[in-house]
Amino acid sequence: MRGESDVKKKVKALFNKHGWFWWMPPANGYGKAGTSDFHALRAGVFLAVETKFGSNKPTALQRAFLQSVKAEKGLSFVVDDRNIEHFEAWLDAFDRATNALGAGGSVAPEDGSIMMNAIAAMTEKMIN
């Protein structure tokens, strides 16, 4: 990956692969300041994803937006070139978990662990 646009391309491809309904809010004067690069919805779960590249971190307004999503019981991640594999692993585990729950089963412990580890990797830049 050479820049943030490559991270965004990969996030788009992963959302499409996993069947998420997603959109990119306007990043201009007509949008809300600090809003995330991606908003997505699947199986009743709202997800906000801010993409970054290299050592770039979310701005104060972006962190505030991500925190507001969490406060409303949504999920918010910072996905970059260093943790994109965690995002993909989280999406894979989320698929298995929602399929298991939809069939009347329960989430496999290993999928819960995968999702929790991925969340830790993708929320680190929100607080640091």
Image (cartoon, rainbow, N blue to C red):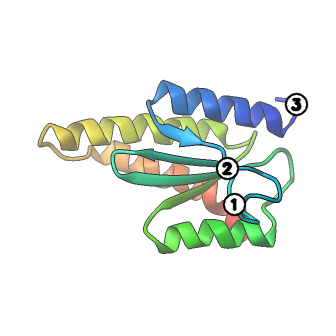
- Callout 2 amino acid: Pro
What is the residue that sits farthest to the front in this orientation?
30
Residue 124, picture quadrant: bottom right
The tag earlier along the polypeptide, 1 or 2, is: 2
Give the tally of numbered discs: 3
Label 2 with label 3: CB-CB less than 8 Å: no
Residue 72 lies, in percent from the top left, at 46, 71
Question: Which of 15/26 is in front?
Answer: 26
Q: Is residue 9 left or right of residue 88?
A: right
Q: What mark, if any, has residue 98 been given in the picture?
A: none
In the displayed structure, 1 sits above or below 128; it is above
Mark 2 lies on residue: 25
In the displayed structure, 30 sits above or below 85; it is below
Label 1 with label 2: CB-CB less than 8 Å: yes
- Disc 1 or disc 2, which is closer to the eye? 2
Q: Is residue 44 left or right of residue 64?
A: left
Residue 63 lies, in percent from the top left, at 70, 68
Mark 1 lies on residue: 35
- Disc 3 or disc 1, which is closer to the eye? 1
Q: Is residue 79 left or right of residue 20?
A: right
Q: Residue at x 34, y 51 (%)?
A: 44
Q: Secondary structure at mark 3?
A: loop
Query: Label 3: few (<14), some or many (≥20) within 10 Å?
Result: few
Q: Secondary structure at mark 2?
A: loop
Q: Residue at x 56, y 30 (%)?
A: 14
In which quadrant is the N terminus drawn?
A: top right
Label 3 with label 1: CB-CB less than 8 Å: no
What is the residue that sits farthest to the left in this orientation?
104
In the displayed structure, 59 sits above or below 106; it is below
Question: Which of 90/13 is in front?
Answer: 13
Mark 3 lies on residue: 2
